[in-house]
Image: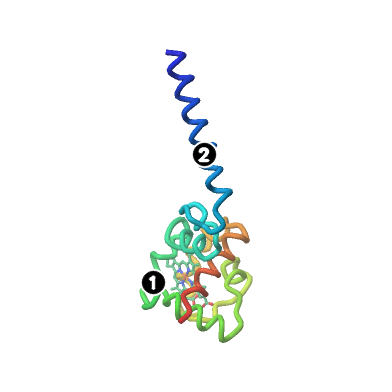
């Protein structure tokens, strides 16, 4: 039994080393893990995952909240700051009449790091036409 466990570990160790070698060699992101490291991809993952943003925002059409494209366009035109908005440091500039609905999600964004918030911003801007 002990021997079997040892062999198991040896195989595991072998494969994990190999994976790392491959990683170092590649110049371009190939594995999903690495792709998720670009801000846009990380932002997309958060937007659709733990950020819960998809519950109210679609890419190109209004649902409960404005579309990502509308938000990105207005923020670009007006020079707004999405990161500061998500930290509740800036007032709404897209649809202030519906701000109370958006506010219910700040409990989630409050827990996020600057890197995560910037990734969300990068993802939203990446949807600009
Ligand atoms: C419960 C529904 C809901 C969820 C969940 C939600 N939003 Fe919103 N969001 C809204 C509504 C409604 C508006 C329009 C009101 C407004 O402009 O503040 C809005 C507006 C916004 C705006 C524009 C704010 C402005 O200046 O007017 C941004 C940016 C935004 N949402 C980002 C996000 C991100 C990022 C997430 C996920 C972390 C998220 N929202 C999750 C409903 C939601």
The one nearer the camera, 56 or 44, is: 44
Q: Which numbered disc covers residue 100?
A: none
Note whether 19 is above or below 46 in the view shown.
above
Q: Could you tell me residue 100's position as x and y percent?
A: 48, 71
The one nearer the camera, 7 or 80, is: 7
Q: Which quadrant of the figure contains the N terminus?
A: top left
Note whether 102 is above or below 7 in the view shown.
below
Q: Residue at x 46, y 56 (%)?
A: 50
Looking at marks 2 and 1 on the same chain, the residue that comes earlier in the sequence is marked by: 2
Q: Secondary structure at mark 2?
A: helix
Q: Could you tell me residue 38's position as x and y percent?
A: 55, 61
Q: Secondary structure at mark 1?
A: loop
Mark 1 is surrounded, within 10 Å at the Cα level, by few (under 14), some (14 to 19) or many (20 or more) other residues, namely: some
Q: Could you tell me residue 57's position as x and y percent?
A: 41, 70
The one nearer the camera, 30 or 46, is: 30
Q: Residue at x 55, y 63 (%)?
A: 39
> Residue 89, located in which quarter of the rendered image?
bottom right
Q: Which residue is mark 2?
A: 18
Q: Which numbered disc covers residue 58?
A: 1
Q: Which quadrant of the figure contains the C terminus?
A: bottom left
């Amino acid at each position: 039994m002990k021997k079997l466990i040892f062999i198991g570990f040896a195989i595991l160790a072998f494969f994990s080393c190999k994976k790392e070698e491959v990683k170092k060699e590649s110049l371009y992101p190939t594995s999903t893990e690495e792709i998720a490291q670009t801000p846009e991809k990380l932002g997309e993952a958060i937007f659709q995952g733990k950020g819960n943003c998809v519950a109210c925002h679609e890419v190109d059409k209004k649902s409960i909240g404005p579309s990502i494209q509308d938000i990105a366009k207005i923020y670009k035109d007006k020079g707004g700051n999405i990161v500061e908005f998500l930290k509740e440091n800036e007032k709404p500039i897209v649809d202030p009449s519906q701000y109370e609905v958006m506010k219910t999600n700040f409990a989630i964004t409050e827990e996020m790091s600057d890197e995560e918030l910037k990734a969300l911003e990068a993802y939203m801007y990446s949807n600009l036409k």
